[in-house]
Amino acid sequence: MFATARRELADFLRSRRAQLDPRDTGLPAGGARRTPGLRREEVALLSGVSSTWYTWLEQGRDIRPSRQVVDALAATLRMTPAEHGYVLRLTGHGGAAPGDPGDGMPGHVQRLLDALGPSPAYAITADWTIAGWNRAYERLYPGVAAVAPDRRNLLELVFTDPAVRALLGDWDTDSRRFLAQFRAEVGPRLADPPVVDLVTRLEAASPAFRAGWASHDVDRFTSAERRFEHPEVGTLLLEHHQLAPADAPGLQVVVYTAAAGSETAARLARLAGPAAGQAAGQAAGG
């Protein structure tokens, strides 16, 4: 395991351990505890490993737990499926990290975005840089085209752009969800320079980001309805989808759709204007 992944694993295990009530694991509450959560020796006992070995794991030592041990720790610490998958990736059991899109936004992916008409859509790279978008997305969030390409990162915009904060219907919840999903995706690549630079900037710029990052929360993406408050057309209830083009490694396409015949669909059509169906995509170069 690489040093950064070991440190992240250590911090993550400590954060999950601190959140557990001993009574939820079948252990007696016992006397007063100096710190909340389970003790290291209790996690080791419940997971079938030695206390010394588990302590080394939380110290970030150069040891690699087996898949069986990772699964046991996940069960002991009551990890969610997203958290379990995150630890598997950190320990080298969860498959390769997303690749790099290489030469930027592929033309065929941009054409796909454009073909989505009034449905706002954009594409992001593995570190959540916005690589391209369609006209509908630019009408939803006009500021995207004005942002410098090296700052056109979805997570950075969520935490630093007042227009995005106003657009998100429940910013407190939405921003924490975005952050948990981002961490789940980039955890094994926390030492990559673009990720280090992004996290450093956001820790300096946003107290909310600092608090969320320190929590070590992770979550996986789920399609669901999201609420936007647009200054021109009002409330938009959009279903959020995320797709990975098979022939564009490292890119993910995000699409927001409205239910047919809904008020949101009508508002999106008004927002997009008469040229909604025309190709008006915008590449990352701006």
Image: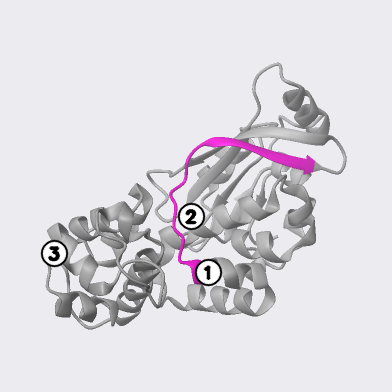
Secondary structure of residue under mark 2: helix
* Mark 1 residue element: helix
Q: CA distance from mark 3 to mark 2?
A: 25 Å
Q: Amino acid at mark 1?
A: Trp
Percent x, y of residue 104:
52, 60
Query: Which numbered dot is residue 213?
Result: 1
- Magenta residues span 214-229
Q: Position of residue 211 (x, y in %)?
A: 58, 70
Q: Position of residue 209 (x, y in %)?
A: 61, 68
* Residue 109 in view: yes
> Is 198 inside the magenta-drawn segment?
no
Residue highlighted by disc 2? 181
Residue at the limit of the structure toward the right, as seen here: 232
Q: Is residue 25 above or below residue 230?
A: below
Along the horizontal axis of the image, is 85 left or right of 178? left
Where residue 263 sits, quadrant-wise, is top right
Q: Is residue 280 visible?
A: no
At a point 58% along the width and 45% down the height, the residue shown is 110
Residue 66: give its label: 3
Going by the numbered disc 3, the residue's amino acid type is Ser
Q: In the rendered structure, does residue 222 fall within the stretch colored magenta?
A: yes
Q: Secondary structure at mark 3?
A: loop
